[in-house]
Amino acid sequence: MSCSRFLSICMICLFWFASCTSDVKDEEQENAQQNLKIIEVTSHDGRPFDSGANHLGTRSYNGGPGGGIMMQAFYWDVPAGGTWWNTVETKIEDWGNAGIEAIWLPPVSKAQNGEFSMGYDPYDYFDFGDYTQSGSTETRFGSGSELSALITEVHAQNMKVYADIVLNHNSGGALEYNQYTNDSTWSDFTGVASGKFLRNQDDFHANAIHSNDEGIFGGFSDLCHDVTNVQDWLWNRSDGVGKYYKNVMGFDGWRFDYVKGFSPGVVNSWNNAVGGFSVGELWDSDVNYLDWWATNANSSVFDFACYYKMNDAFDGNNLSLLNDDMMWKRNPFKAVTFVTNHDTDEIWEKMLAYAYILTHEGYPTIFYKDYEVWLDKERLNNLMWIHNNKATGTTSILYADNDEYIARRNGWNGNPGLIVYLNDSDYWKERWVPTNWYSTKIKDYTGHSGWYPTTQGGGWVKIQAPPHSYSVWSPE
Ligand code: ZN
Ligand code: ZN
Ligand code: ZN
């Protein structure tokens, strides 16, 4: 078929399509307009999330259109044998090319369980797999030099690396008679091979200061952050944990473990003294609690409220729950959103959840196993591209019911933003929505829909989404 013939057929089609749909459209659209109650979720100036530390390079997404994306670069019980740092290192370049801005590593120092430990039972904060103690030389993940090589590669790719900091509790100390409890406790850490951060009963609860803090974890020795020796070695000294990890090891930020176990002032003090990006694991669905902690810790916080709402919404077929309060709606610049992590994995409709966090505000996290093993990598790469190129500006929820949810990112600084359409039903859905784009041809950047509609003069347009899937619209 020649081009001109094809064109003329197309023109006829267009005229026919335009004339025969206009009546239907008016009625449909009137209904849509009447039923539509737009919820303005956020009202800041529209600037994107910036995780800081842009000293490293010039990747376009680094502080660019949607802000960064974090990869949780491990899962529970990754292969032991000291190979994990090497495994992660081989993936850094691909992750960077796919749009990952930063990676989060498991605790890097020697723990009581040595080569078998995932690191959450810290023993010697300055043994990165270099000293033979706790039954091994290397950690489960590798040696100190393998860790350094990984960090070097991350920076070579203009990415950032966050350390997992466990400072609520310690494990693996020697038995000593404890004057505060009048019995014997495993609180003698004066024998750590690194010779740094020596501590004993005076540094744990109960002690001369008080009997306890906000929380203990299992039967572990509970560090007291009111003790000068502890404060010095964790964040004040230039050769202490925080400053050594940052300035010598090269870490760019922190994921603080189990922050329910101590005052938010601890993380605040660390951030004040050490600097770098910071996110706390406050495992709680209560938005007020998350917001309170983030403010007082001067830190981002994982958005467990969003996590539980997504679980109820997507798996319970009740997408209107996405109207509810979440940390990212309170403060998008202090919310780290996620779909799964090494501790909890409950959401079945994971691609809907990833489509949600990668198009909405907050600092989204991709879980290693979702990306490398369980889900369609190309689909995730597509959503990451959308995040890094189109997910800008404040958020308005345009529509939500049991199985449909439509939200608009309003754009920022010349970037057009997007409209995301989530469909949790068994059928294709379509709906008229108001855009910020006028007489503009738009398309679905996921490729799920083949429509290329043009918005009306007033901005209205009809979009569609496939069953148990999503579409993301923006000008062509
Ligand atoms: Zn204390
Ligand atoms: Zn505690
Ligand atoms: Zn479903």
Image (cartoon, rainbow, N blue to C red):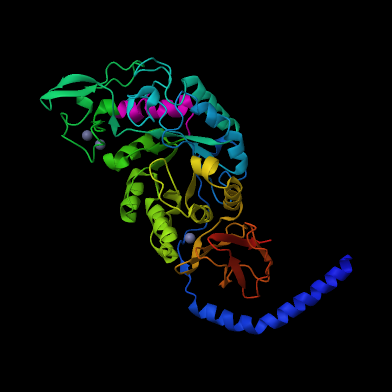
- In the image shown, does 28 or 303 lie closer to the viewer? 28
Q: Quadrant of the N terminus?
A: bottom right
Residue 257 in picture, x, y percent from top left: 35, 38
List the single residue furthest toward the left: 182
Residue 232 in picture, x, y percent from top left: 31, 26
Q: How many marks?
A: 0
Point 55% across, 46% down: residue: 63
Specify whether residue 457 is painted magenta. Answer: no
**Start and end of the magenta stretch?**
231-252
Q: Is residue 238 above or below residue 404?
A: above
Specify whether 203 is left or right of 329. left
List the single residue furthest toward the front: 426
Specify whether residue 232 is painted magenta. Answer: yes
Residue 64 in picture, x, y percent from top left: 58, 48
- Examine the rendering and report whether any part of residue 262 can be seen: no
- Give the dominant element type of the magenta stretch: helix, strand or loop: helix
Residue 382 in picture, x, y percent from top left: 61, 50
- Residue 305: image quadrant is bottom left
- Examine the rendering and report whether any part of residue 286 can be seen: yes
Q: Is residue 185 above or below residue 338?
A: above
- Residue 310: image quadrant is bottom left
Query: Ligand 2 quadrant?
Result: top left
Point 53% across, 61% down: residue: 468
Q: Is residue 224 above or below residue 393?
A: above
Q: Quadrant of the C terminus?
A: bottom right
- In the image shown, does 104 or 16 lie closer to the viewer? 16
- Residue 182: image quadrant is top left
